[in-house]
Amino acid sequence: MRVKTAGRALSVRMPILTGVVFVAPALILFAVFILYPLITALSYSFFSWKGTLRGEFIGLENYVTIFTKKPFDEDLPNAFAHNLLLFAGAMVFQNSIGLMLAVVLHKIGKLKRLFQTMFTMPYLISPLVVGYLWSLLLSPLFGPVNAILKQIGLEEFALPWLGDPTTAIWAIVFITAWQWIGFPMLLYGAALGGIPDEVTEAAEIDGAWGIKKFRTITLPLLLPALGTVSILTFIGAMEAFAIPYAVGGSDGTPAGATDVMALLFYRTAFESGDVGSIGTSSALATVLFLFIFGVAVALRFLLARGEKRLYG
Amino acid sequence: MRKRFDLLALPKHVLLWLYALVSLSPLFVMLLNSFRTTKEMAMEPLALPEEFRFTSYEKAWVTASFETYFINSMFVTITSVFLGTAVSLLAAYVFARSKRKIFGVLEGVFLSGLLLPVFLAILPIFYLFDTLGLISNLWGLILIYAALSIPFSSFILAAFFRQLPVDLEEAARIDGAGHFRTFFFILLPLVRPAIATVVVFRFVPIWNDFFYPLMLMRDRAVYTLPVGLTRFFGEYQTDWATLFAGLTIATIPLVILFLVASKQLVSGLTAGMSK
């Protein structure tokens, strides 16, 4: 308490000028390179463009274009569906395996640190490197993955995973999961570490063991971590760019099967050659921005409400 | 305190080692293949190197310009981490020690940057850079990365400043030190652990980033490693040995960082994610 009062007394004495001088460098950088471009991007979408020359105000016309005109009428739903699939795939595979690893690692003893380090290693590597590495490993010609499958008698699974439009996006789900697994594992691990021993012991005395103990005690206490993991997985899946770029290039080879929203935005902004591309790509950016930010904020709100109901 | 014998200890360890194999074997294959020749790989996709040759590294480093990319990446990453941390430190000090509303609002604005999909603002940044003459200029990247570091770094550092008791600062003030001197000579030495977390934790995404240089660096001489890799993969498509060497070069600094500072990285990961 004493510290707190002292802090208040001290703060009165920090002159506003000192505060402004200290904050100014960060504020200038943030305003010039983050806030200003974000707001400007929004405004670009309401104008017509001829190359880099801004024309008149056209209201929502660019938005109509990206939802109804070629090539957007096909590319946009296709790319968006892939983003949603990346999110669903990550929630189902990556986050459940991450949770399982965290549960197994909990109280494993001395080696915990070593395992955590090994599982987190891929997370630190550039997603671009990861994408290129796996495109080599999964190559149908001399890729080691198919060589292993053939050697252990699973010849029928030695497929051109990245070349076939039906499997390519699933290969990306797998590659992303391989890279990200350490992230849900660490978060769940931290949450598990926060559950007091008395709670689990009391449950054991009451006869809750194994799966039952996990379902009734551990899982509810993990809910806040589950919420955080969901939000960050959502943002990650919607912003996916480097891995799809490394695997399928900027046009989502094969046949748009690995196309995602960020690639569509990139192509529209920098590769389309269309004179109105600044307007349409800014409209794309705005829609994507509102969707990502809106859902993230809504999820966070729901999470806070759910927690309140659970813990009073 | 009772200690039960864990029946599941053995299967648990088997499972964990199996996953460790899944997690690390692709990286070992990458490393081992960088010492093999493309011919060896074509004949036998899965094998150890016949001998440890560094010819692929030489080719990637010299012929494929990885030397330039590597130096650019190092320069950009170190400078921007330094700049981003410095400005965040100054701001975090004010956030933690001033109770004025305006700074509280500003802290909230910075924090929202953690959730904003900022890459969507690339077009205005492109034209801003065009006017400022920062296209194909490494300093442009440095400024962007420093700005992008502010939300995470100021958040972590402000939390750390708040934990420090103010007694020391009061004493320094009574002895006649101003805010600047108190900050530089009393507080900075105390927040070193938080600085270490921030530095290590920002190094990784900046070193790995490929989006901004892809858009803003339009000349080979200013490519960083990731964007250099995209060119390289187009040009050396069939030269697998050199491709593996290039990927390894881009990865090694991170592995070294991870081995040296895994503690900071793991704590930064959990802190950054849970907020």
Image (tube, rainbow, N blue to C red):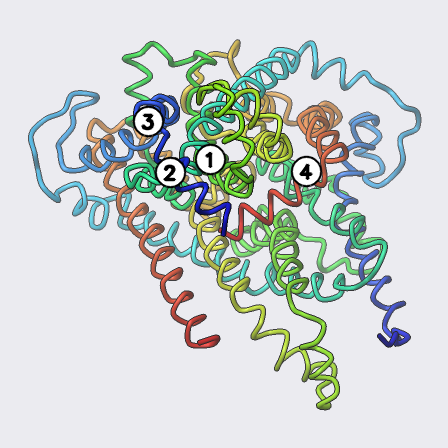
Residue pointed to by mark 1 = B154
Q: Nearer the viewer, residue A147 or A228?
A: A228
Specify the subunit that label 2 lies on: B
Q: Which disc is residue A136 wearing? A: 4
Query: For mark 2, does the 10 Å Cα neighbourhood hold few (<14), some (14 to 19), or many (20 or more) residues?
Result: many
Alpha carbon separation for disc pair 4 and 1: 39 Å
Mark in front: 4 vs 3:
3
Residue pointed to by mark 3 = A15
Residue A211 in percent (x, y) is at 70, 81
Seen in the picture, residue B128 relative to A133 is either above or below; the reply is above
Alpha carbon separation for disc pair 4 and 2: 40 Å
Specify the subunit that label 4 lies on: A
Q: Earlier in the sequence, mark 4 or mark 3?
A: 3
* Dot 1: element: helix
Q: Amino acid at mark 3?
A: Pro
Alpha carbon separation for disc pair 1 and 3: 21 Å
* Dot 3: element: loop
Residue A84 in percent (x, y) is at 43, 57
